[in-house]
Image (cartoon, grey):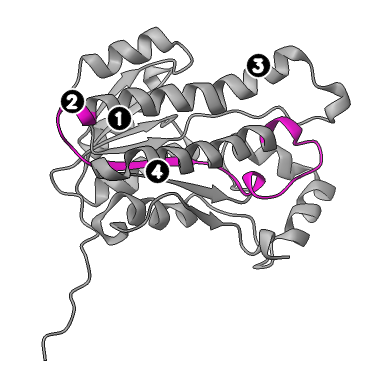
Amino acid sequence: MILPKTPSFRLDGKRALVTGAGRGIGLALAAALAEAGAHVTLVARTENEIAPAAVEMRGDWATLDVSDLGAVATFFDARPAFDILVNNAGTNRPKPMTEVSEADFDAVLDLNVKSAFFVAQGCVRKMLAEGKGGSLIHIGSQMGHVGGPNRSLYCASKWALEGMSKAFALDLAARGIRSNTIAPTFIETPLTRPYFDDPAFKASVLAKIKLGRIGRVEDLMGAALFLASEASALVTGTSIVVDGGWTAD
């Protein structure tokens, strides 16, 4: 009997781009792809956040403000096509909807949706120009599947990202380019750690995560590797929800 062979999770010979790669989720996902053999380019606004990690991963880095669409276009024009994009740069301004200002709205939606769109567009245009397929991985949130108190802006942006990714998948399937999201629950990172200093907030989060703990960046690394690799060759237009059961309730 000839048994089926598991598709490879290796990424040798692949070029990957990770935005918001200086710390937290972005850094972890860059490390996962590098460990699997990809040559990873780390992008962030501050060089000192990404350069040491890129050296350790034997990749490279570029300082880039992804909200500067001219700079984004120049970035892609100057490089060969990537095989994998991790569209991770994002922000949040949690507050009641009655207190949201226009500046808050623009800050969250411009980075989480507009910048994500045009980074993906720049990446895809280069893929198409070189006749390459690939994988787009957008970092969404469980808040792109449910609502949350004081999260009107974040929910708006992450629901938009989910719809955007599905539409990308339909536009690009015939060209061999897949588009999916990873939707995490609360993950402890340098950005979120101060929130958990509030015992009431931490208790409210743990009450919703059925597996009983705050997420770690390591919890997302396998999902990213799966979506980047041939192991997910028939997966597009969907979301991997890594939420400890939050959205199952």
Q: Do the residues labelled 2 and 1 touch (CB within 8 Å)?
A: no
Relative to 77, say whether 19 is above or below.
Answer: below
Identify the residue position indicated by label 4 in the image. 169
The circle on residue 124 is 1
Q: Quadrant of the C terminus?
A: bottom right
Q: Give the range drawn in magenta.
A: 127-154
Disc 4 and disc 2 in contact, CB within 8 angstroms: no
For label 3, the residue is 106
Depth check: 16 or 198 in front? 16
The residue furthest bottom is 1
Identify the residue position indicated by label 2 in the image: 129
Residue type highlighted by circle 2: Ala
Secondary element at image label 3: helix
Residues at marks 3 and 2 touching, judged by CB atoms closer than 8 Å: no
Give the camera-side residue of 249 and 217: 249
193 on left or right of 78: right
Residue 225 % position (x, y): 33, 53
Question: Within 10 Å of the Cα at label 1, are there few (<14), some (14-19), or many (20+) other Cα atoms?
Answer: many
Which of the 4 quarters of the picture holds residue 80? top left
Q: Is residue 210 above or below residue 44?
A: below
Q: Which of 102 and 189 is in front in this view?
A: 102
Tell which tag, 1 or 4, sits nearer the viewer. 4
Q: Earlier in the sequence, mark 2 or mark 1?
A: 1
The kind of secondary structure element at disc 2 is helix
